[in-house]
Image (tube, grey):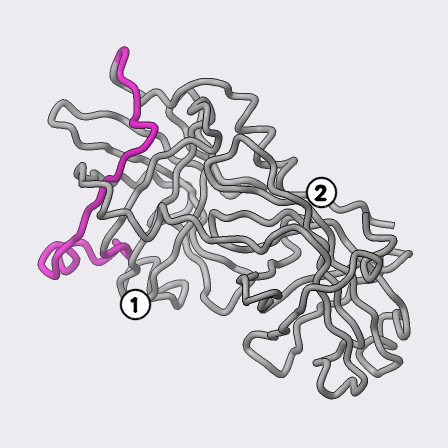
Amino acid sequence: MKKAQVRSTTCIERALATGVALMLAGTAGAQAPQQGCFVRSYDAAHLQAHPEQGVAALRLWFYSETTDRLSPAAIIEAQMADQGQGARDGVGGQTLTQDALCEASGDCFVECDGGHFSTQSLADGRVQIETSSFAIGDAESCGGSSDLAEQSGASTTYVLDPAPSAACETLAQIHPLPGPGCYGIDYSDRGHGQGLLALRLLLRAPQPGFTYPVAEGSIAVRLPDAARARAVGLAGVRVSVPVVCSARDGTCHSSPGDGSLAVVPLGQGLALSTARFLVYGPDSETFDIADPTQERTRHQLRLMPDDACRGME
């Protein structure tokens, strides 16, 4: 049976292991802001003169994953132009984001070999980033993805201006997570369950010490004896996987590459939605709980007694 590699282990522990403040490469003694905003917009004339550039604007937010300010990280957002890599990857006009963990060397990297960029502090207060490969966006969702590098393997450089924190407010905001407890829904009619008979989400209290609260838990689904479940040998089976939910973006993840769940508190319950989220059977069979006929599958879960999540601890 496949053992899920929880995102908090792959990301947070690596960030904690650095245990240092982000240093900007190329400037002796310079230190990147542990909370700072940098922006850059490119006008039509610049883009016309650089048709290979598929990035029309950038926002970069430096922060620390932990409240002790010793785990540097960054969030980067790119508004894609309908040219260069934006046109190549079919994301022209879209806004794509990516989280990165940073090291003392000034490198900021994406987990699971998603690439990296290096940083350099310029004398006028601006920040230069350079990359030959840095994945941005979500290849698992309908939003699409691209690369900050104009050509894979070739160096691309951007220079960003310092900006007030308010300019990065939407990147820095904390998305509230539901409180700890057992949430669920049962469907008597599998047609209304969007391919599921029951769904449970068990959340524990957030771990202390993180800038964006992180809550561990698990999700379980009961599958009907229907064609899609039968096709993968999971008809009538109850399966569960561990998840880690972060207030950074209000989503829960299991294994890297297996999709995500967006969770929003809703009264005494929560709203859950996903474009793709895989669960695993006892022999590594996979089932996507997202309804393939919908762009996003949504469920409204209510707070349930703790014993409704029995066996999910």
Residue 299 found in image quarter: bottom right
Pair 1/2: label in front: 2
User: Distance between the Cα atoms at labels 1 and 2?
Assistant: 34 Å
Residue 111 numbered tag: none
**Magenta-colored stretch includes residue 30:** yes
| Label 1 secondary element | loop
104 horizontally vs 141: left or right: left
Q: Position of residue 231 (x, y in %)?
A: 85, 76
Residue 312: image x %, image y %?
Answer: 82, 52
Q: Is residue 134 left or right of residue 257?
A: left
Nearest the camera: 19 or 284?
A: 19
Left or right of 111 on screen, residue 164: left
Pick whichever of labels 1 and 2 is earlier in the sequence: 2
Q: Is residue 118 something one can see in this rendering?
A: yes
Image x and y of residue 75, in percent: 39, 43
The verdict on residue 68 being magenta is: no
Mark 1 residue type:
Gly
Task: Indicate left or right for 228 with 271 as reference.
Answer: right
Badge 2: how crowded within 10 Å, few (<14), some, or many (20+)? some
Mark seen at residue 5: 2
Residue 93, numbered circle:
1
The extreme top residue here reads 29
Q: Which residues are magenta?
A: 28-56
Eyeballing the image, is 268 above or below 14? below
* Tag 1–tag 2 contact (CB < 8 Å): no
Confirm whether residue 274 shows in the render. no
